[in-house]
Image (cartoon, helix red, strand yellow):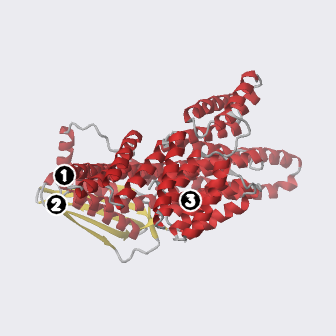
Amino acid sequence: MRNGFIVGFLLLFFWVGAQPQSADSLQQVLRKENNPVERLRLLNALSDAYKPAAPESMRTYALQAQKLAVQLGDHVQEGYALISLGNADVLQSNYKRALRYFQQAKSIFETENQTLPSVKIGMAKALGSLGIIFSEQSNYTKALEFYLKAVTIYEQLNEPERCARLYNNIGVLYQSQQAYGKALTYFTKTEKLLKDPNDPVLGVTYTNIGNALVGQKQYTSAASYYQKARLILEKNQDARGLGELFNNLGLLYQKKGQKAEAIKAWQSAEQTFTAFGESFGLGDTYFYLAQFWQTEKQTDKARFYAQKTLALARQNEVLEQQMLVEKLLSEVAEKEGDLNGAFRHYKLYTSLKDSIQNAASIRKGVEAELNFEFDKRNLLQKEALLKKDLLLQETAKRNRLQLVYSVLIAVLLFGLGFLWYNRLQIKKTLTLQKELAEYEQKALHLQMNPHFVFNCLGSISSFIVNNGKESAVKYLAKFSKLMRLTLEFSKESLISVDKEIDALQNYLELEQLRFNSIFEFTIEKSDDIEDNMGIPPLLIQPFVENALIHGIVPKKNAGLITIRFDLDAEQLRCTIADNGIGITASQKIKAQSVSVHKSMAIEIIRMRLEKIASTTGKTAGVEIKELSSQGTVSGTEVILSIPIQFIAQ
């Protein structure tokens, strides 16, 4: 039931490991230590010792370590402190801030000496921690990418135990997607690498193998691995792991029809979780018992355990568990003939279901924002590194030129060689300047994405309020497709005209749904435009949005937007026309509006056009004019002209 919790527990377990010293002993040593370098090491070790039971204590010592590391200029220890801060946030489900900490740690280790083992281990930990963030978001592709990068470093360092823990996490990712065969492959790798037969990670791995085998309906083999796991978990006194194991054993016995054994296993789980004070696992145990007695048609016992589950679910604020329990209580009441009670619990069930669906929609939006911020931060980091590299090259170049000039005065025979060398350096500089201009253009493009996303989210909010849930679902599906296209485009400086048309088509269909089809649109492309001709992404959409919002919507009757892509000499021309109220009337409406929102889209586009012109050495511009017919305003026309560019093959 709580697969998501189990996955999270195992991922965090990777970073726990066996601590060389307890928190108490480290505190005693820290109180006596006056050497700031040694105190920094102890602070980081003390923060690490508090995982995972005390995230606030972990944060306190990590902040002290970070402050001292900055004072001492010890970047490696600063990176370790940032990882501890991020892990503390993961334990408290603050993934957005954790992502920033892990990204900062990764940036620090990237600038340090990559031959040092401490730097390599720090980089591997940062990458593995980023994998945790994306796995918690169910973004398994990115999580797998970072896990594989981390395991590559550990393989180079010949760290089989650390590799084993990462293999275990990768197996959990596949198990979460019900890819049991792939999961077993990685769990088996973990088992082979762990040399200590009493390693606590081996106990968790055996539990994972058992779960995967249950998924493949190999119940006999699963039972044998559960037994191996139990021996190791009991030896290591891992109460949480034992409780989860007993819950899984109960489910296995239930599938095999061994009812008495299933009840016995869940009773063991209850005792273990109660002694440990683990209310989340105990809630699962009670729910499994409630489901079991419901299938046995013993409604009194089913209701008893369901109510205990509900109390814990409310205490832990687990909405999904509350929803499932309310549904179960409704079914129990119906079997007992209590129709009023059944109806009451069913209403609570549907209310909780709606809340969970709304929360899921919000979470997806936050996850999309997180992913976007992460990609944007990476791009800005690359730009900063490029600028730094350019500065270093320029400094080196000046030093070399001074040396060459000194030699030239003494030895004129080297003149010809110097001229050739100088031309080569100038060519490199021009190439770097061109690349820098392209990165600046990408940075401006990234500023467009938040503007576009926030406008779309506003549209979704309005649509949900005015049109109901079914239409909202349809709207969200189209928005999801548009967001995928937008995120794909954010990685490219140029996209094909066909891709741009696809995105515009999707956007206008969204707005047709939102405004109840008060407008029509057409998109045309000249046959002269080649497939590999490129256009900067998100350059057209803001003008189309202006045509709709400021031209068609105020008109309040049937509108038409036409978009056409043509070639004009050495330029790609895009024309956006509408039959709206025109520029003058739109400006009057805006002047009378009480809204203080200031749109930056057109200004950003003008800056992007300037960068395109400086990069290509050709003209680029935009012309906006009001259309009229026989003295009457008939709409607005925007003509966007950019140099013809081709997508690199």
Give the spatial CA distance, label 3 vs label 2. Answer: 50 Å
Left or right position of 366 against 581: right
Residue at left offset 39%, top offset 58%:
292
x, y percentage for residue 565?
34, 68
Report crowding for label 1: few under 14, some 14 to 19, many 20 or more residues within 10 A (C-alpha): few
Tag on residue 466? Answer: 1
Q: Earlier in the sequence, mark 1 or mark 2?
A: 1
Pointer 2 residue: 518
Nearest-to-viewer mark from 1 and 2: 1
**SS category of the residue bearing label 2:** loop
Pointer 3 residue: 172
Q: Earlier in the sequence, mark 3 or mark 1?
A: 3
* Residue 597 seen in the figure: yes
Whether the residues at callouts 1 and 2 have beta carbons within 8 Å, the answer is no
Query: Mark 3: which amino acid?
Result: Val
Residue 565 in the image: above or below residue 35? below
Q: Earlier in the sequence, mark 3 or mark 2?
A: 3
Query: Mark 2: which amino acid?
Result: Ile
Q: Nearer the viewer, residue 10 or 392?
A: 10
Left or right position of 320 against 181: left
Nearest-to-viewer mark from 3 and 1: 3
Q: Nearer the viewer, residue 568 or 83?
A: 83
Report crowding for label 2: few under 14, some 14 to 19, many 20 or more residues within 10 A (C-alpha): some
x, y percentage for residue 200?
67, 50
Give the spatial CA distance, label 1 vs label 2. Answer: 15 Å
Query: Mark 1: which amino acid?
Result: Asn
**SS category of the residue bearing label 1:** helix
